[in-house]
Image: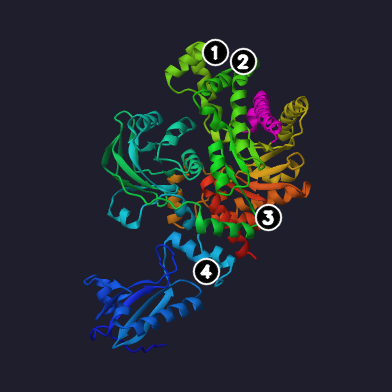
Amino acid sequence: AVNVVAMVFGNTGDDSGTGVAFTRDPNTGEKQFYGEYLPNAQGEDVVAGTRTPFPLTKLNDINPAVYKQLLEIFEKLENHYRDMQDIEFTVEHGTLYLLQTRNGKRTPYASVKIAVDLAEEEKISKEEAVMRVTPEHIETLLHPYFTKETMESAEFLAKGIAASPGAASGAVAFDPDTAEKMVREEGKAVILVRPETSPEDIAGMAAAQGILTSTGGKTSHAAVVARGMGKTCIVGCEAVEVDQKTRTMRVNGKTINEGEWISIDGTSGKVFMGKLDSVKPQGLEGPLAKLLGWADEIRKLGIRTNADTPRDAKIAREFGAEGIGLTRTEHMFFQEDRIFAVRQMITSSTREQREKALNKLLPMQEEDFYGIFKAMEGLPVTIRLLDPPLHEFLPKEDEDVKELAEEMGMTYEELKTTVEDLHEFNPMMGFRGCRLAVVYPEIAEMQTKAIIGAALKLVEEGKSVVPEIMIPLIVELEELKFVKSVIVKAADELISKSGLKLDYKVGTMIEVPRAALTADEIAKEAEFFSFGTNDLTQMTYGFSRDDYGKFVGHYMEKGILENDPFQKLDRVGVGQLVKMGTEKGRSSRPDLKVGICGEHGGEPSSVEFCHIVGLNYVSCSPYRVPVARLSAAQAVVKNR
């Protein structure tokens, strides 16, 4: 086919010209015509930048009749296409010609505002408005970001795995203590740079503007914690080599000293030299709040959050979370006022010693849970019992080992041997999860008392509390029975003694393939399931979630993997375990409540899959709650 089109000329005198216009402001979304006009010119004169165009109203000064005709056409085109239009036009000797129209590109904020305005003008439905906004738009509006122009003009250093969105600039700090000191004493913004973070780094991560690690993937410690805190984070940036002795880092041949400034973009994974200016986020208000309200009317999935502190719980609730799907109790143990007692507990050689240490921790844990329950009053809160390998809590520095040995009445050599014996070769599949509660039931007993004790305090104050106690890493029904019996005994004794009424649930995480395969048996004892898809992906693929970043990029480049399975739920393999586990569990317990609490809970494709297989809720980090709300609504519309 051949299209033959008459050429029109805007460069034939002052009664001619060319222009580009939008039917709404593409930057703000405001309902006002936005554009430029250049008299006696062709389109390439505008594009080349050799002449400066005038505001669109210049055409009204030159030829009011043509300007009026143009505005009428704007209205007609937008009403027809039901979206903001980007229009190119030419005026030849006073006659208006349209060259093209198309849906106009716009900023994330404008996307939301235009979609909401068009729905309120009844040009599109609320469902269409929800479908016209992307999850990426939402994330941009909730985090600071670097503009494309800013990044293009900056000195690029390296690229890693984008783990938590946003834009951050700060002075480099190579350990958490230095990060805290630079913020507290020098008032500096800081980027914490580590080979990889551990739970001991929590305070430094909280003080920093952003986190950069040379190893790890999207579900590594740094990534998970940063997302929960709403911190910008890049992981697996292998070009970064940290030298703790010289307090420097080398990046592709460039040496950067501690205290020098770098900038990181958590959306693209790019690292830049120096301090870049970022654009502040718009926040959850105005048109975005209205759009997400419409999404809530459409979606079927509940949206919960992963939160370990009252602050996180409060933020998530403000973002629309309907409860907590995962509270990781281990994150509470690393605070300065309790880590010593935790270490005493771990290195105890007798039950009496262990219980003495646990009695120190009990009021601290109870206080933690009280704050979280209060922030989530009236909404369900799922608290996971202690999960990680014990060696993560143990001292690494000789001075700390000596201090602990003295307190425990042991020699330095005896404690050093104990610490070395507790080290595990494959800790992700070692002595962790419910196995801790089987070997040391007193740990589960203490945590249960803290959970129920906190809940009873609030009940006494007239508050509504919905505690759910979750047992991690179950692989066998008898294992679940044993740990559940410890929990129920401790909980019922406290409730009975208080004389108050408190309902609670005991459920489990499905994180191991065997648990999904035997879910019908496990559901006989578990009152709810929560799929921990981070570990389930790890164990199904046999990929270490801390080391897979070394090769998964190559797999994707070579077409072996289409997506990173820790970022986007693998529907064919891991997803089938989720589907099967849900169906088998409900065959034994029809009213079984099922959710997921892995990082997939905030990823749009994964949320859609959870909707398709009939889960009750997804749980994600606080700053991804709005994304999950939108994605859950879009899943309904797509699969109707």
Given this view, does label 4 or label 2 mark the residue nearer the observer?
4
Task: Specify whether residue 247 is in view.
Answer: yes
Whole-percent x and y of residue 499? 78, 28
Task: Specify whether residue 562 is in view.
Answer: no
| The label number, if any, that marks residue 353 in the structure image | 2
Label 3 belongs to which residue?
Answer: 614
Mark 1–mark 2 Cα distance, whole angstroms, equals 9 Å
| Label 1 or label 2, whichever comes before in sequence order | 2
Instruction: Say whether residue 93 is left or right of residue 493.
Output: left
Q: Amino acid at mark 2?
A: Gln
Label 4 belongs to which residue?
Answer: 118
Instruction: Say whether residue 407 is left or right of residue 27.
Output: right
Mark 4–mark 2 Cα distance, whole angstroms, equals 67 Å
Q: Is residue 450 magenta?
A: yes
Range of magenta residues: 433-462
Given this view, does label 3 or label 4 mark the residue nearer the observer?
4
